[in-house]
């Protein structure tokens, strides 16, 4: 699946990874699965790894509609949500900018874009230098 997520409860963090062609439908499915997950909690921070996308859907009206739908769900939780987009290629940076600019303060979302793993993790207050180290620690804690 081009969009996957992993909840790292010990870090109050959701790691989302996209790969290949980034489609609105895949985002909707992943966000829906996250919203229904028993470990999903209001105020969880989101690390969105866009480093592996090769292209993105160009239907910008659908992309903005997706942001609005996700925003309604997050705003209903009444806690601010931090979103950090990790983007290193021109296409991932374009996708990150589009996603970041789709949030408003009314959604209760603070969104930023970072181009290094260490900066993305530092922005989230997570004590790791790489995503691999974070994910390894998360899987060993939940095992």
Image (cartoon, rainbow, N blue to C red):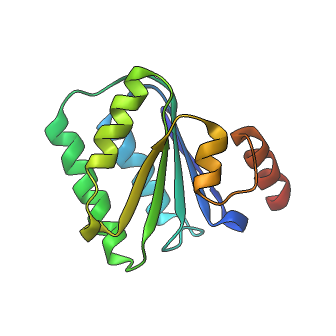
Which residue occupies the foreground of this view, 70 or 45?
A: 45
Residue with the most extreme left position: 61
Query: Percent x, y for residue 103?
Result: 28, 56
In this rendering, the answer to whether 62 lies above or below 53 is below
- How many numbered discs sit on the rendered protein? 0
Q: Name the residue at 76% across, 49% down.
A: 128
Taking 107 as reference, is 142 left or right? right
Q: Name the residue at 76% across, 54% down.
A: 138
Which residue occupies the foreground of this view, 20 or 120?
A: 120
Taking 24 as reference, is 83 left or right? right
In this rendering, the answer to whether 117 lies above or below 73 is above
Quadrant in which the C terminus appears: bottom right
Query: Percent x, y for residue 11?
Result: 69, 64
Q: Name the residue at 79% across, 51% down.
A: 139
Q: Name the residue at 47% across, 61% down.
A: 82
Taking 134 as reference, is 56 left or right? left
Query: Percent x, y for residue 96?
Result: 38, 38
């Amino acid at each position: 699946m081009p969009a996957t997520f992993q909840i790292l409860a010990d870090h109050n963090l959701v790691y989302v990874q996209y790969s290949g062609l980034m489609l609105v439908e895949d985002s909707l499915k992943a966000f829906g699965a996250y919203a229904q997950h028993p470990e999903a909690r209001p105020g969880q921070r989101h690390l969105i790894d866009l480093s592996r996308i090769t292209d993105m859907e160009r239907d910008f009206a659908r992309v903005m509609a997706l942001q609005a739908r996700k925003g309604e769900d997050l705003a209903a939780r009444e806690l601010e949500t931090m979103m950090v987009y990790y983007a290193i290629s021109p296409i991932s940076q374009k996708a990150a900018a589009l996603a970041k600019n789709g949030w408003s303060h009314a959604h209760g979302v603070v969104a930023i874009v970072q181009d290094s793993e260490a900066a993305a993790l530092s922005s989230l207050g997570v004590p790791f230098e790489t995503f691999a180290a974070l994910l390894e620690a998360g899987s060993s804690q939940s095992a």
